[in-house]
Amino acid sequence: MKVLVPVKRVIDYNVKVRVKSDQSGVDLANVKMSMNPFDEISVEEAVRLKEKGAVEEIVVVSIGPQQAQETLRTALAMGADRGILIKTDDNVEPLAVAKILEKVIGEEGPELVILGKQAIDDDSNQTGQMLAALLGWPQGTFASEVVLEDGKINVTREIDGGLQTLSLQTPAIVTTDLRLNEPRYASLPNIMKAKKKPIDEKAPGDYGVDTAARLSVVKVTEPPVREAGEKVEDVAELVTKLKAKGAI
Amino acid sequence: MAVLVIADHDNATLTDATHKTVTAAKAFGGDIDVLVAGKGAGDVAAAAAKIDGVRKVLHADGDAYEKQLAEAMEALIVPLMDGYDALFSPATTMGKNVTPRIAAKLDVMQISDITGIEGTDTFERPIYAGNAIMTVKSADAKKVVTVRGTAFDAAGEGGSASVETIDAPAGPFKAAFVEEKIVQSDRPELTSAKTIVSGGRALGSKEEFDRLMIPLADKLGAGIGASRAAVDAGYAPNDYQVGQTGKIVAPELYIAIGISGAIQHLAGMKDSKIIVAINKDEEAPIFQVADYGLVADLFSAVPELTEAV
């Protein structure tokens, strides 16, 4: 089986984002960038399936600026086989990303596509589901377990209140949730090896997809600041204050 | 103008998230119809008809809709959208799963997790886990949005909408339901709980988490939450997780116990009305958002609090 894993370059998980003073967006200058954490989980899952012998080839795809190549190299160092960089400096919305991926899938013919459930920059949580709809494929979103068995993909999903298991016909889309696995750190030899793995360079235009934004940003602002309150001396004082507020 | 709202339910009861989505739809404007797709969900359709401000309930019944699987919901809803200008879904796991499929088929860029509405094409939504708020204007002819429940009040009762039964595509679909493990609990669900007690890694073990948190939650009739660190350490199940990658909550009272207050946790609870933090580290970031901070050893403070309330 061939697996395709799209990966996105985003502000590192641990960076505190700053809103630009002109309200046009958040400040990305000189900020540490990394692979979207949910995408790391997707790459890890694909590599584990390959290690189990269920998968022959893992292709990673990134749509973004030249530096997204580093994100692809990270995925290759984790164990993916080759990369495709679809280079653009534009902000490509989930719908256009899904349309580009639909074309890539038409060329590559994977039986399984594993995506992160959302990117931690725009928090949209859309691309996997949109891609599934465009392809007419079944989807298993927010996966905490993926089992390949008898030509089907059984996906256990994190849903409100518990877990749900679905059986998907192939080809299928899976989006990953936090508990699916713990991504590995690439070893130095694997990082060296990854430098020799091939990365194809393309542009959105090669796939004939219009990436013009449907949403225009009116403004980006800081969330309302919550003022720190007061320190209480002991439990008795806490209870008195909460009772006075009618909170308990 | 007309808006279609997708009802979130379990075939027996309608979730509060649906009422909140109706409130958002009212702010958008136009006639509001609610789609109840389920199996044997007549009671849910009747309940939806009573929501104030609803014009009509569309009731679709079929095996494929029992679990509201995305493939079936797409087949059902896409043709219905000919008659609507907007689709509003609750940002529950159902809404998040289903709605983007419909948006893609309509060639619309969805706006996820809206927290505010400024007219019929402009919406406010949190990005970067709530560390920034973005206002976007949509150029699409139809609008497809999911609604963050904590940002809107629940619509009241008092309506008397008609219920219309509609045909639902029966499939076959390429995904099949196998099983579900829903945690049975008498506790309020986190996203609708009035009070939440939430535990962090400082509790030290699953045994201590249960020993200290459960009696306090029982006393307060509260839901139990946990930080991601506590979930990662195995002290609490994942569906307890409050934060960017877990549940977004905004109860009347949120009591954070042994939680340091990582950005990702704050993102999930900082809209709570009253925040209490109990932590022995007085430098913990949680105190910067807490209305009442108690610097104390949780192992003595929590039993004392349980005793006192």
Image (spheres, rainbow, N blue to C red):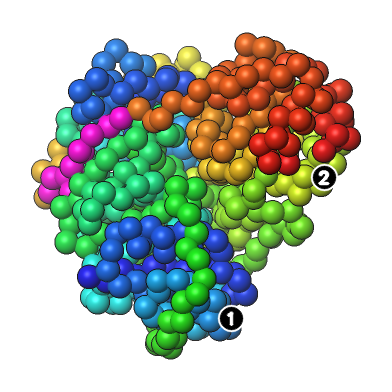
Report which quarter residue B103 is drawn in. Answer: bottom left
| Residue pictured at 44% horizontal, 26% vertical | A225
| Residue pictured at 63% horizontal, 19% vertical | A230
Name the residue type under label 2: Lys
Residue that lies at the very extreme toward the front in this rendered image: A244
The chain identifier of the residue carrying mark 2 reads B
The chain identifier of the residue carrying mark 1 reads B
| Residue pictured at 47% horizontal, 21% vertical | A14
Q: Nearer the viewer, mark 2 or mark 1?
A: 2
What number is the disc on residue A37?
A: none
Q: Is residue B153 left or right of residue B290?
A: left
Q: Position of residue B32 (x, y in %)?
A: 34, 71
Q: Is residue A72 above or below residue A93?
A: above
Q: Is residue B151 left or right of residue B217?
A: left
Q: Is residue B65 visible?
A: no
Q: Which residue is mark 1?
A: B43
Badge 1: few (under 14), some or many (20 or more) residues near its Cα, within 10 Å?
Answer: few
Lower sequence index among marks 2 and 1? 1
Q: Is residue B171 above or below residue A136?
A: below
| Residue pictured at 66% horizontal, 29% vertical | B276
Q: Position of residue A189 (x, y in %)?
A: 47, 16
Q: Position of residue B278 (x, y in %)?
A: 72, 24
Name the residue type under label 1: Asp
Report which quarter residue B255 is drawn in. Answer: top right
For the image shown, how many numbered marks are present on the structure? 2
Q: Is residue B25 visible?
A: yes
Task: Pick the residue in front: A213 or B4.
Answer: B4
Distance from label 2 to label 1 (Cα)? 32 Å
Q: Which residue is mark 2?
A: B219
- Residue A215 part of the magenta segment: yes
- Residue B284 part of the magenta segment: no
For the record, the magenta segment spans A210-221
